[in-house]
Amino acid sequence: MNLILLFDDDFVTATRVKLSGRRLEHVRSVHRAAVGDALVVGAGNGRIGFGTVTHIDGDSLEMDVELDRDPPAALPLTLILALPRPKVLNRVIASAASLGIKRIVLINAWRVEKSYWKSPRLSPENLRHQFILGLEQARDTVLPSIETRRFFRAFVEDELPLLVGGTRALVAHPNAQEACPRDVREPVTLVIGPEGGFIDAEIASLQAAGCTPISIGERVLRVETVVPYLVARLF
Amino acid sequence: MNLILLFDDDFVTATRVKLSGRRLEHVRSVHRAAVGDALVVGAGNGRIGFGTVTHIDGDSLEMDVELDRDPPAALPLTLILALPRPKVLNRVIASAASLGIKRIVLINAWRVEKSYWKSPRLSPENLRHQFILGLEQARDTVLPSIETRRFFRAFVEDELPLLVGGTRALVAHPNAQEACPRDVREPVTLVIGPEGGFIDAEIASLQAAGCTPISIGERVLRVETVVPYLVARLF
């Protein structure tokens, strides 16, 4: 937790917050903060600054807060991701948030196991929690949005052509001829497939919707590795 | 498992292998392979090709193997990593192997908790297993080397100046002035600190040993995110 993310409910006055639970525990056990210490804080979807500890015990943490700068710039990237297995979903979501991705669409694909869609990790509460962990890690405040689309074909044929408008639309694909572009100066829509990849018919549909297949070389990388890899490559 | 990694003990003749255990289970349950199917295989530290299934049941998998191409190129990168917490060590090691990193040195630092050095995950058997998982993922065959150095100062003062010779030596540091270089055409030595970063005295020692601090921007990323991010940025 490199930044303590604050929400409306935390503010007891315009400049004072009172926290308990997970954030209090973290500040006590990891930061080991005492009265007078200044901690990096940020208001949810707002500015960043410092909170000066005015009270701390086992029940609550109180800080006087001064927010004086903007959060880091968002990535101009929409990430469309075949739903990963539940075991890695949390990590991928938190990592994407830490990288500054602000819009994620989780989609179905032939090689996405049906059972993945039943995972409790897809609950809005859990996804929001993973976003918060990623933002706290990266010292960001702006919560991403996340949507799910259970029907690949309906999404790719009806929604995707509109979604990619005004962006450079790419789909990562092991057999693609074109290399991943670098230093892209425009917004990007990036589609990443499931373990085992998209099937040929899915790649054809994505191409018809405006996405260019791009390769990242001979190596097949796991989704939690390929997301930061492609973000660094693109921007 | 995008490639089945084969070792000397697996070969019953020069071109035939017999497998059991984890690889057999994976081929049965995930690949669902039958006699006549061709699977991607590679010889440990050797070439890649196909194995044609000649026999498969609950006890063993036999394949006729033809190895006809080289594994993907290695990254010209030595990764020097402050020992991560045990929970993430396996993932970081497997991810580094999948990216093509062939030399890793795990070092101590002020903010590395002493207890991390007692983790059973540091056993040579476990580290080798994580490498194998990473290579199987990326369709590579060349096992990385990994070393551990419990004494930061002895390593940085005595070994590191020699190790960085002939390479571009960089240390990722949140407050660095210089941005991470791109498209580097020479070998790189990359040092990555612990959660919370290196302390100032450690950065000074690393600089004295020839490492240039480089920034990756305002965001503080987790080690499992920053390794693929920096690899993509550098090469």
Image (spheres, coloured by chain):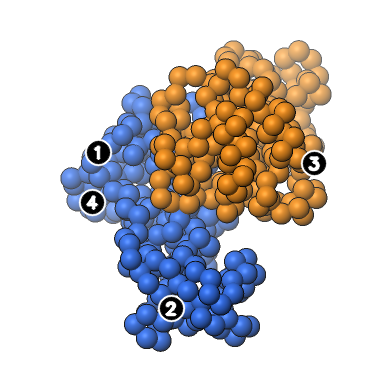
Chain colours: A blue, B orange
Marks 2 and 4 sit apart, C-alpha to C-alpha, by: 42 Å
Q: Secondary structure at mark 4?
A: helix
**Please, is residue A146 above or below residue B36 in the view?**
below
**Chain-order first, disc 1 or disc 2:** 2
Quadrant of the image occupied by residue B51 = top right
Marks 1 and 3 sit apart, C-alpha to C-alpha, by: 45 Å
Q: Can residue B99 be seen in this snapshot?
A: no
Observer-nearest residue: B47 or A75? A75
Q: Residue at x 81, y 24 (%)?
A: B9
Marks 4 and 3 sit apart, C-alpha to C-alpha, by: 48 Å
* Residue B65: % across, % down: 67, 18
Quadrant of the image occupied by residue B63 = top right
Q: Secondary structure at mark 3?
A: loop
Closer to the eye: label 1 or 2: 2
Categorize mark 3 by other alpha carbons within 10 Å: few (<14), some (14-19), many (20+). Answer: few
- Mark 2 belongs to which subunit? A
Amino acid at pointer 4:
Leu
* Residue A55: % across, % down: 54, 83
**Please, is residue A166 above or below residue A72 in the view?**
above
- Mark 1 belongs to which subunit? A
Marks 1 and 2 sit apart, C-alpha to C-alpha, by: 40 Å
Q: Residue at x 43, y 68 (%)?
A: A50
Q: Are marks 1 and 2 on the same chain?
A: yes
* Residue A195: % across, % down: 51, 43
Tell me the residue that label 1 is attached to. Answer: A185
Tell me the residue that label 3 is attached to. Answer: B123
- Mark 4 belongs to which subunit? A
Q: Can residue B118 be seen in this snapshot?
A: yes
Categorize mark 2 by other alpha carbons within 10 Å: few (<14), some (14-19), many (20+). Answer: some
Tell me the residue that label 2 is attached to. Answer: A64
Q: Residue at x 34, y 39 (%)?
A: A235
